[in-house]
Image: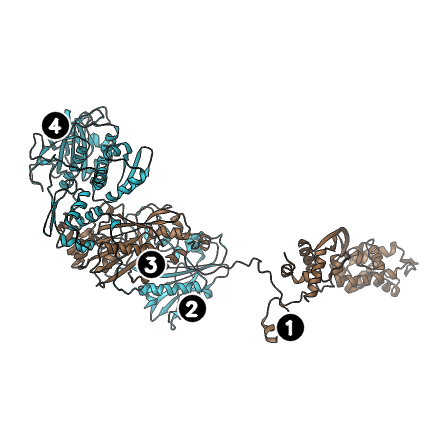
Chain colours: A brown, B cyan
C-alpha cells in the first residue's frame, strides 16, 4: 500500500496519535490527554496503528489501578468521619459511642468502626471519664486523604504511578484502615508500552507535510453548508473499499421482469395483448379448438373441473352450433369431422384454463383486426404432480396472426423472428409437430450455447375446422412459446418450483444472469 | 402422448439401413417422434401425433422412415373380398360390447422381441386409443387350436367355466371378475351387465372373456407358435377395424401371410352386416391444387406433389388438371380435410427446405388497459420499498379458509383435485403473502412484500357464474408495523390513482384487529381494505412477527 493510500485508511484518532510519535516509548496514559482523545478513543487508535504495523508493543507490565467507589464518593461529599469525631468529643468530652451515633450524620456501623480504630490506635484516650484527643491524632493523614478523595472524584480511576509520592503513601495507609479501604477498589491491569516504528515516523512526516491534523471534515452537515464552515478546510479522504451496510430494496419479481421483457417485445413486434378468465368452459378451451370430446387429454385426470358452479349457463351462438356440427360432420368446413355425437352439456362444463390458446379462440369471435396480431401471457393449469419440472399453474405465452397472406413460409418466418428476437438464438430448426387445432404444425427448436438444442415452442395454421365455425375465413397462424425453460435459464434456476418460491431470501438473491 | 419401447435389434431388422442414434433421432422427425431415452438394447420413443396409432409400433416407425428416405417401396395385397373363416356375432351382445373383428396370421416367426412388441402394441392401443380397454380390447391366440366359425355371444356369468391365463383351474366368469388380477382391473367395464361377453369356437373352447382375459388353452401365445389369430372387441367399429389393419400391415412387413376372416352381424353396422377383416376402407380424398398455393405460398408441380406424398406413404396418386386425387393408406384414419394432405406434402418436402417469409403487414401493438394499469401499480409498490412476489393461483382450502378463519364461500373449488394442496383458486392475494412470511422468518427484517394478479370467485349474479378479477396485496412485517404505516401506502396509491375523495370506514374482518382496520370507500363502493393482522390469524400461520396488510380490488380502482 502506498503512503497516499495508507493515509486514506487512517481514522482521525490514528492521525492525532501519529502526530505525537517520536523515538520515545509511550503508553496509552502518556498520550491520552495530549491528543484531546479520551482513554478509550486513544486505546482504539493505538490498537489500529499496531495492526497496521506503524507502532509496536515494546513492554508489558502489570499496574495497580484504583477505582473510586460509591462509598468513597459519599465520604468525599461529607468529609471524613475521624475529624468529625475529634470535633465532637472536644466539645463533649463525656460523649460515648451512642452519643456520637445520635449526633453525627454517618452510618452507625461506620461510626463504631472509626471510634474503635481511633481508640485502639490511641488517637483518642479516656482520662477520668473524659475523652481527649491525643498527640497521636494523625491530622496530616486525614488532610492528605481528603485531597486524595478529591483527586479520585475527578478521575474515577487512577493508576498508582499517576499519584504523587505523598498521595501514594496516603493511599497505602488507607488500605490498612478497614473503613478507608472501602473508598476504592484495587485492580491489577496489564498495560503496554509502545514504540513508533519507522513506517509510523515516516507517515508522521507525510502528515505534517500535507497539513493533516485529524480534524479534517468527515460528514458534511447542513450547518457547515449554511455557515460556510467548510471553506478553507480539508475533506478527509475515505477508504472507498470499505464494505457498506446492506440495504433492502423494493424490487419487481425477477420472473415477472422476464415476462415484462417478453410483453414489450411482442408489443414492439406489433402484437396486441389479450386477456381472459381463469375459469373457462370445455367449449372454448377445447371444443372450439377442434379437440374431440373423446380426446385422451380431456379425461377427468387431465383437467381441473370446477365444483360449483359446474356448468356455464349458455354458450354464444352461432358458435356453439357451428362447432358442434363441425365435430359431428365437418359442417361447412370441407372436413369429414370427427364423426361422433357432440355432447352439448359436456361443452358447458367449467374447468380451469388448461391452455393459453383459449384466448386466441375467443379473440376470433371478437371482431379481430385483419391483418392483426395478438398475444397473451396466460396463467394455465395442468393436472401434473408438482415436482422440479412441473407446476400446477404456470405461464403460457400464446398468440395468433390473422392475414390473407399468412401461409406456411410466413409461419416459419414468424417463428424465426421469435427465435432471434425473444430467445436471441442464432441457430434454429423446424420439426413437424402435432396439435389438434393446427395443420400444418411446427415445432421450432433453437440452439442454446450451454444447453444445446431445445424446443422453443410450437405453431401452426389453425385448421379450417377451428376458424370457419368462429366466422373467420382468412388463414390464422397460431403459436405458443414454452417460456418456463427460458426463464429458468435467464434466472439461473434449476428447480421450476423456485419460479414461485416461498423463500424471501432466495427471491432477494435471484437476478437475471443473462 | 404415447411412449413406446422398441428393441434396437427389432427396429434394425425392419429398417432398410442402420442408423446411429443421432441419425435415427433426425429421421424420427418425419414420424413426429422423438428419442426419449436410449439404453444398450432399446430405444424409448415418444410419439407426438395422438391421431396416428399406426406410428406407435416399431414396424410403423420403420415403414415411415423407409418410405421417407426412399429406401423401400411397400405394396400390400392382403385385402380380400371373401373368406372361408367366420366370426358369428349373436344379437344379444349388441347392448353389452357390440363389435368384434378378427383375422389370422400365418408363417409368423415369433421370437422374444416380437412377442414383447406384440404385447406392447396390444397394451398401447387398448390403453391410449381404447380408453383402458373400454373402447378397444385385443386378444391374440394360437390359430391351430381354434375350430371356425368363432362365436361372439353374451352368456350368464355362472353358466360357463374355463381356465384363464395365469390360472391352474377352471373358474366361472363371475369368479374371474372377483379373483383374477385382470378381472379386478378391468371387470368394471362389464360387471353391471346381467350377461358377460364371451368368445368361443365351434369346439366350445373359450378364446376369451373380453375385455378381461384370454383362456389359457387357446390364448397363451408362445415363441414357438407359427400361426396366430388376432381379435378385437369394443364400442367403435371404425377404430377396431383401423387397429386390426395396423396389426395386419405390421405383420405383413415382417413377412407374415394374412388369413382374412369374415364377421357376420345380426344387426346393422356402419360397415353393413358382414365384412372381411382386414378391412379395405378404400378411402380417398380430392384436393384442388390451388389450395396448396394458399397454404404453402406457391403452386407445386405435379411431380413434386407425387414425390413428396410418396415419401409419406401415398402411392395411388392421380393428378388431372388442377385436381389431385389420392387413396389413403388403410392404416390411417386421420385424414379429415385437405389441409392434412398439405401437411404431409410439407413434411415430405422437409420443413427446413422452405424459403421463409417474414410477416410484412403493418399492425399496431399495445398492452391491454388492465396490464398497463397493473404495471403502474407495480412501479408504485416498488417505489414504496416492496419486493414483488409470485404465488400459485391454484392453492388449498387450508390456506384460503382454514388459516384465515373464514367460512367457506365464494371460492371456486376443484371437483377433482389431484391433492389437497391444490384444490381451490385463490380469491385473495393475502394468504399467499402470509404463506411467504411464514416460511421467511429467517430473512432480514423488515419484510415488505406485494403481489398483483388474478383471483377467481363464484359470481352468482353474473352471466358466467364465476369471475376473474385482479387484486393487489401488500404485507409489511416488522416489529413496528402498524395501521398508520399502511395508511401512508394507501394514501399514496389513492393519490397517484387519482382518487382524492376516498373515506375510511371501520372494517369488521376476522383477519384484522378491530379498531385498527379500515375499508377504503369511494362513491359508496369498497375499493379495498387494510389494517393490522389479528394475532389469532398469525398464530394459525405460525408467524411470530407483527404483520399489517392491504388488499385493493384493482378492477374497481381502475374504473
Disc 1 from disc 3: Cα separation: 62 Å
Real-space CA distance between mark 1 and mark 2, rounded to the nearest whole angstrom: 44 Å
Residue under disc 1 on the same chain as residue under disc 3: no
Is residue B550 rendered to the left or right of residue B445?
A: left
User: How far from the left and from the top, in percent, is residue A342?
Assistant: 16, 50
CA distance separating discs 2 and 3: 23 Å
Q: Quadrant of the C terminus of chain A?
A: bottom left
- Quadrant location of residue A369? bottom left
Disc number at residue B201? 4
Q: Are marks 4 and 1 on the same chain?
A: no
Judging from the image, mark 4 belongs to the subunit labelled B
Residue marked by disc 1: A232
Q: Quadrant of residue B408?
A: bottom left
Residue B337 to residue A205: above or below: above
Mark 3 residue element: strand
Write the residue at 76% across / 51% down: A59
Q: Which of these two is toward me, B484 or A257?
A: A257
Chain that bears disc 3: B
- Residue A474 place in picture, x, y as percent: 19, 59
Q: Which mark is residue B454?
A: 3
In percent of the image, x 67 and y 53: which residue is there? Answer: A51
Residue B54 in percent (x, y) is at 20, 40
Is A304 left or right of B157, judged from the image as shown? Answer: right
SS at mark 1 in the image: loop
User: What residue sits right under mark 2 in the picture?
Assistant: B492
The CA span between labels 3 and 4 is 63 Å
Amino acid at each position: 500500500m502506498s503512503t497516499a493510500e495508507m493515509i486514506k485508511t487512517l481514522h482521525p484518532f490514528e492521525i492525532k496519535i501519529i502526530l505525537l510519535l517520536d523515538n520515545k516509548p509511550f503508553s496509552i496514559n502518556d498520550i491520552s490527554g495530549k491528543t484531546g482523545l479520551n482513554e478509550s478513543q486513544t486505546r482504539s487508535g493505538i490498537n489500529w496503528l499496531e495492526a497496521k504495523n506503524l507502532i509496536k508493543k515494546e513492554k508489558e507490565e502489570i499496574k495497580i489501578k484504583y477505582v473510586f467507589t460509591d462509598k468513597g464518593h459519599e465520604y468525599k461529599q461529607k468529609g471524613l468521619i475521624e475529624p468529625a469525631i475529634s470535633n465532637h468529643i472536644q466539645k463533649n468530652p463525656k460523649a460515648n459511642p451512642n452519643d456520637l451515633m445520635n449526633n453525627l450524620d454517618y452510618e452507625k456501623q461506620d461510626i463504631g468502626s472509626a471510634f474503635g480504630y481511633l481508640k485502639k490506635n490511641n488517637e483518642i484516650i479516656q482520662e477520668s471519664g473524659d475523652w481527649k484527643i491525643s498527640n497521636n491524632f494523625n491530622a496530616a493523614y486525614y488532610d492528605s486523604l481528603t485531597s486524595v478523595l478529591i483527586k479520585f472524584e475527578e478521575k474515577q480511576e487512577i493508576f498508582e504511578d499517576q499519584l504523587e509520592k505523598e498521595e501514594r503513601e496516603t493511599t497505602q495507609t488507607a488500605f490498612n484502615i478497614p473503613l478507608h479501604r472501602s473508598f476504592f477498589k484495587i485492580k491489577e491491569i496489564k498495560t503496554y508500552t509502545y514504540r513508533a516504528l519507522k513506517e509510523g515516523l515516516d507517515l508522521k512526516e507525510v502528515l505534517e507535510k500535507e497539513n493533516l491534523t485529524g480534524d479534517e471534515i468527515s460528514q458534511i452537515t447542513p450547518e457547515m453548508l449554511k455557515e460556510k464552515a467548510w471553506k478553507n478546510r480539508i475533506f478527509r479522504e475515505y477508504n472507498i473499499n470499505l464494505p457498506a451496510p446492506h440495504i433492502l430494496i423494493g424490487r419487481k419479481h425477477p420472473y415477472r421482469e422476464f415476462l415484462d421483457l417478453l410483453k414489450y417485445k411482442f408489443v414492439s413486434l406489433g402484437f396486441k395483448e389479450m386477456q381472459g378468465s381463469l375459469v373457462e368452459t370445455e367449449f372454448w378451451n377445447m371444443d372450439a379448438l377442434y379437440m374431440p370430446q373423446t380426446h385422451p387429454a380431456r379425461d377427468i385426470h387431465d383437467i381441473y373441473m370446477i365444483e360449483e358452479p359446474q356448468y356455464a349457463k349458455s354458450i354464444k351462438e352461432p358458435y356453439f352450433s357451428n362447432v358442434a356440427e363441425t365435430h359431428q360432420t365437418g359442417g361447412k368446413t370441407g372436413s369429414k369431422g370427427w364423426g361422433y355425437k357432440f355432447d352439448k352439456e359436456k361443452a358447458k362444463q367449467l374447468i380451469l384454463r388448461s391452455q393459453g390458446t383459449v384466448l386466441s379462440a375467443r379473440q376470433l369471435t371478437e371482431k379481430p383486426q385483419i391483418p392483426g396480431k395478438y398475444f397473451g401471457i396466460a396463467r394455465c393449469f395442468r393436472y401434473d404432480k408438482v415436482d422440479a419440472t412441473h407446476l400446477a399453474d404456470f405461464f403460457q405465452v400464446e398468440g395468433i396472426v390473422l392475414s390473407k397472406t399468412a401461409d406456411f413460409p410466413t409461419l416459419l418466418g414468424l417463428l424465426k423472428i421469435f427465435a432471434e428476437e425473444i430467445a436471441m438464438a442464432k441457430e434454429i430448426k423446424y420439426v413437424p409437430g402435432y396439435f389438434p387445432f393446427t395443420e400444418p404444425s411446427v415445432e421450432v427448436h433453437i440452439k442454446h450455447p450451454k444447453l444445446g438444442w431445445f424446443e422453443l415452442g410450437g405453431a401452426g395454421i389453425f385448421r379450417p375446422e377451428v376458424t370457419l365455425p368462429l366466422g373467420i375465413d382468412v388463414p390464422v397462424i397460431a403459436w405458443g412459446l414454452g417460456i418456463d425453460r427460458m426463464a429458468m435459464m435467464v434466472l439461473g434456476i434449476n428447480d421450476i418450483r423456485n419460479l414461485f418460491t416461498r423463500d424471501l431470501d432466495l427471491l432477494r438473491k435471484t437476478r437475471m444472469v443473462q | 402422448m404415447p411412449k413406446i419401447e422398441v428393441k434396437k435389434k427389432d427396429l434394425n431388422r425392419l429398417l432398410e439401413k442402420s442408423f446411429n442414434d443421432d441419425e435415427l433421432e433426425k429421421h424420427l422427425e418425419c414420424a413426429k417422434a422423438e428419442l426419449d431415452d436410449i439404453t444398450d438394447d432399446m430405444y424409448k420413443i415418444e410419439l407426438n401425433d395422438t391421431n396416428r396409432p399406426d406410428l406407435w409400433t416399431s414396424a410403423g416407425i420403420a415403414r415411415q422412415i423407409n418410405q421417407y428416405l426412399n429406401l423401400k417401396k411397400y405394396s400390400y395385397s392382403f385385402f380380400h373380398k371373401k373368406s372361408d373363416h367366420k366370426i358369428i356375432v349373436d344379437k344379444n351382445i349388441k347392448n353389452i360390447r357390440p363389435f368384434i373383428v378378427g383375422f389370422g396370421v400365418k408363417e409368423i416367426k415369433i421370437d422374444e422381441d416380437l412377442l414383447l412388441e406384440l404385447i406392447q402394441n396390444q397394451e398401447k392401443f387398448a390403453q391410449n386409443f381404447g380408453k383402458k380397454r373400454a373402447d378397444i380390447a385385443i386378444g391374440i391366440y394360437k390359430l391351430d387350436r381354434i375350430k371356425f366359425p368363432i362365436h361372439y355371444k353374451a352368456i350368464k356369468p355362472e353358466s360357463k367355466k374355463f381356465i384363464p391365463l395365469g390360472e391352474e383351474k377352471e373358474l366361472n366368469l363371475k369368479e374371474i371378475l372377483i379373483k383374477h388380477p385382470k378381472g379386478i382391473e378391468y371387470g368394471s367395464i362389464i360387471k353391471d351387465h346381467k350377461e358377460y361377453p364371451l368368445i368361443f369356437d365351434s369346439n366350445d373352447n373359450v378364446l376369451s372373456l373380453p375385455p378381461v382375459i384370454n383362456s389359457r388353452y387357446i390364448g397363451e401365445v408362445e415363441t414357438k407358435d407359427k400361426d396366430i389369430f388376432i381379435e378385437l372387441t369394443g364400442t367403435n367399429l371404425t377404430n377396431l377395424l383401423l387397429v386390426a389393419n395396423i396389426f395386419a400391415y405390421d405383420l405383413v412387413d415382417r413377412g407374415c401371410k394374412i388369413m382374412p376372416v369374415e364377421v357376420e352381424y345380426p344387426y346393422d353396422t356402419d360397415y353393413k352386416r358382414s365384412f372381411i377383416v382386414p378391412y379395405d376402407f378404400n378411402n380417398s380424398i380430392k384436393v384442388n391444387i390451388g389450395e396448396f398455393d394458399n397454404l404453402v405460398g406457391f403452386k407445386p408441380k405435379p411431380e413434386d406433389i407425387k414425390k413428396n406424398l410418396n415419401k409419406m406413404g401415398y402411392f395411388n396418386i392421380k393428378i388431372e388438371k388442377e385436381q389431385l386425387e389420392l387413396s389413403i393408406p388403410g392404416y390411417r384414419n386421420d385424414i379429415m380435410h385437405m389441409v392434412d394432405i398439405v401437411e404431409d406434402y410439407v413434411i415430405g418436402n422437409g420443413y427446413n427446405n422452405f424459403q421463409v417469409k417474414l410477416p410484412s403487414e403493418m399492425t399496431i401493438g399495445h398492452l391491454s388497459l388492465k396490464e398497463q394499469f397493473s404495471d403502474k401499480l407495480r412501479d408504485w409498490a416498488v417505489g414504496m420499498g416492496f419486493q414483488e412476489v409470485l404465488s400459485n393461483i391454484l392453492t388449498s382450502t387450508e390456506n384460503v379458509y382454514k388459516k384465515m378463519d373464514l367460512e367457506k364461500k365464494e371460492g371456486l373449488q376443484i371437483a377433482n383435485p389431484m391433492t389437497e394442496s391444490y384444490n381451490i383458486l385463490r380469491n385473495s392475494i393475502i394468504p399467499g403473502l402470509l404463506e411467504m412470511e411464514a416460511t421467511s422468518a429467517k430473512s432480514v427484517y423488515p419484510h415488505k412484500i406485494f403481489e398483483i394478479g388474478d383471483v377467481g370467485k363464484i359470481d352468482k349474479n353474473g352471466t358466467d357464474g364465476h369471475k376473474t378479477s385482479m387484486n393487489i396485496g401488500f404485507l409489511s412485517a416488522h416489529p413496528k408495523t402498524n395501521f398508520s404505516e399502511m395508511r401512508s401506502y394507501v394514501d399514496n396509491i389513492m393519490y397517484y390513482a387519482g382518487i382524492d375523495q376516498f373515506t375510511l370506514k371501520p372494517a369488521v374482518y376476522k383477519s384484522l384487529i378491530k379498531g385498527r382496520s379500515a375499508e377504503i370507500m369511494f362513491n359508496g363502493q369498497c375499493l379495498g381494505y387494510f389494517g393490522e393482522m389479528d394475532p389469532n390469524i398469525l398464530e394459525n400461520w405460525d408467524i411470530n412477527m407483527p404483520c399489517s396488510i392491504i388488499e385493493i380490488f384493482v378492477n374497481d380502482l381502475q374504473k
